[in-house]
Image: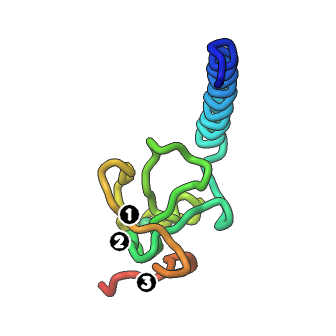
Amino acid sequence: MITKQELDNAVKQENEAQEIINQYYREQQEAFDRRMKENPIFTDEELFYSAITLCPCGHGLAYPRNCSVNHYWDCSAILKGEVDEAVEHVAQLPFSMTSIKGESEHNGTTRGVFKPKES
Ligand SMILES: [Zn+2]
């Protein structure tokens, strides 16, 4: 039988572990927020692309891999700092408001895709 003492110790360890986990995610979030503020330009490797959804400008939608669950899909050209101001881009689409499918081997990817609408 597990004693009450052993249970109490386990609960204490669990709480301490949870605090470390929370701290880790807080620090990750702060680092990401700083990055967005100081240098919101990302490389292809840092981005996670949509499977099929494109911005009206013709580039795929994407988001930075280390963003939080409260982040949003955006135009990958904007995220890479290669934005053409002359064309229209998608508004930022919060994850909670959309169900855009992410890239995968099975779903495909918009990585490297550029299909501008014919005008
Ligand atoms: Zn765009």
Callout 2: CB less than 8 Å from ligand 1: yes
Residue at horizontal 67 percent and vertical 22 percent from the top: 10
Up the image or down, 103 lies above or below 85; here it is below
Circle 2 sits in a helix, a strand or a loop, which is it?
A: loop
Going from the N terminus, do you reach mark 1 or mark 2 first?
2
Disc 3 and disc 2 in contact, CB within 8 angstroms:
no
Give the crowd class for mark 1: few <14, some 14-19, many >=20 residues within 10 Å. Answer: many
For residue 116, side relative to residue 8 (left or right):
left
Q: Which residue is mark 3?
A: 115
Q: Tag 1: residue type?
A: His
Image quadrant containing the C terminus = bottom left
Disc 1 and disc 2 in contact, CB within 8 angstroms:
yes
Q: Residue furthest front?
A: 1
Q: Position of residue 27 (x, y in %)?
A: 67, 31
Callout 1: CB less than 8 Å from ligand 1: yes
Up the image or down, 90 lies above or below 52; here it is above
Q: Tag 3: residue type?
A: Lys
Residue at horizontal 57 percent and vertical 79 percent from the top: 112
Q: CA distance from mark 3 to mark 2?
A: 9 Å
Image quadrant containing the N terminus = top right
Q: Is residue 33 at least partly visible in the picture?
A: yes
Q: Which residue is mark 2?
A: 56
Going from the N terminus, do you reach mark 3 or mark 1 first?
1
- Name which quarter of the figure residue 90 lies in: bottom left
Q: Is residue 19 at least partly visible in the picture?
A: no
User: Depth check: 104 or 63 in front?
Assistant: 104
Disc 3 and disc 1 in contact, CB within 8 angstroms:
no
Residue at horizontal 38 percent and vertical 72 percent from the top: 53
Q: Tag 2: residue type?
A: Pro
Q: Which residue is mark 1?
A: 89
Give the crowd class for mark 3: few <14, some 14-19, many >=20 residues within 10 Å. Answer: some
- Name which quarter of the figure residue 45 lies in: bottom right
